[in-house]
Amino acid sequence: GDSVTQMEGPVTLSEEAFLTINCTYTATGYPSLFWYVQYPGEGLQLLLKATKADDKGSNKGFEATYRKETTSFHLEKGSVQVSDSAVYFCALSGGAGGTSYGKLTFGQGTILTVHP
Amino acid sequence: NAGVTQTPKFRVLKTGQSMTLLCAQDMNHEYMYWYRQDPGMGLRLIHYSVGEGTTAKGEVPDGYNVSRLKKQNFLLGLESAAPSQTSVYFCASSYSMTGDRHQPQHFGDGTRLSIL
């Protein structure tokens, strides 16, 4: 079945540092890939997405490129802020072929803490 | 701008008790989902629904039942609560799959459930 693996956390950075959170996936077919963010006490929010190989998703300074050859979708940001402190989830949909009804397969999440 | 609303936000149960979690969405979404979030495991799909009157099992359905009597509501029931069901439960909804079949999901803020 489909699976998503994220780098182990937690990740602690100083403000303005460069961020990378690694995400790799296993799926048949042609999945769409997503990054969701969860702020403390809240539900998940879509951060960015990519629906086909070589697509780059971007939002709020975050970027991720769909790399089919390496089955990866790493999240990057050039300069993090304290307000970026949250849990980040990589997820995929539609990898198993056929009709997936939008079901998401999540990675385990990466806790990011940014210090001033 | 309510989006996805979950009730209650917190609940403590004793083993063997029953309860129902309510999810309501006002975006006219066809698809709705129930997930549970446990430390280090990301989110796992319990049940989902692709339309009013339909439900289907997800990855971890045992011990839960669901109903979708109205398009805007998706209920998750625990008939006989067990300590292993202590978790944070999230409801999500999305548009149905069309040309762009991978629609992002919109999440509620979660229900924190403790089973003693």
Image (cartoon, rainbow, N blue to C red):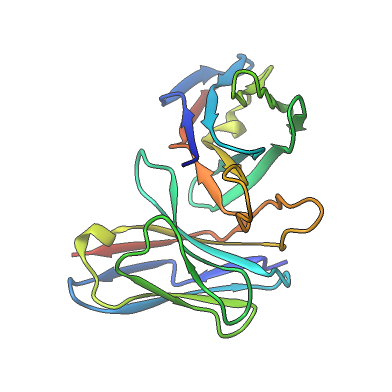
Determine the image quadrant of residue B52.
bottom right
Q: Between A20 and B29, which is closer to the camera in this rendering?
A: B29
- In the rendered image, the residue lying farthest to the bottom is B69
Determine the image quadrant of residue B51.
bottom right
Residue occupying the point 20% across, 61% down: B83
Whole-percent x, y for residue B74 in the image: 53, 75
Q: Between A28 and B28, which is closer to the camera in this rendering?
A: A28
Q: Between A27 and A15, which is closer to the camera in this rendering?
A: A27
Residue occupying the point 24% across, 71% down: B81
Whole-percent x, y for residue B115 in the image: 23, 65
Q: Between B30 and B87, which is closer to the camera in this rendering?
A: B30
- In the rendered image, the residue lying farthest to the right is B99
Residue occupying the point 69% across, 27% down: A66
Determine the image quadrant of residue A82.
top right
Whole-percent x, y for residue B97 in the image: 73, 59
Quarter holding the C terminus of chain A is top right
Residue occupying the point 50% across, 40% down: A2
- Give the answer, above or below, for where A12 lies relative to B51: above
Looking at the image, residue B116 sits to the left or right of residue A93; the answer is left
- Give the answer, above or below, for where B111 lies relative to A78: below
Looking at the image, residue A53 sits to the left or right of residue A7; the answer is right
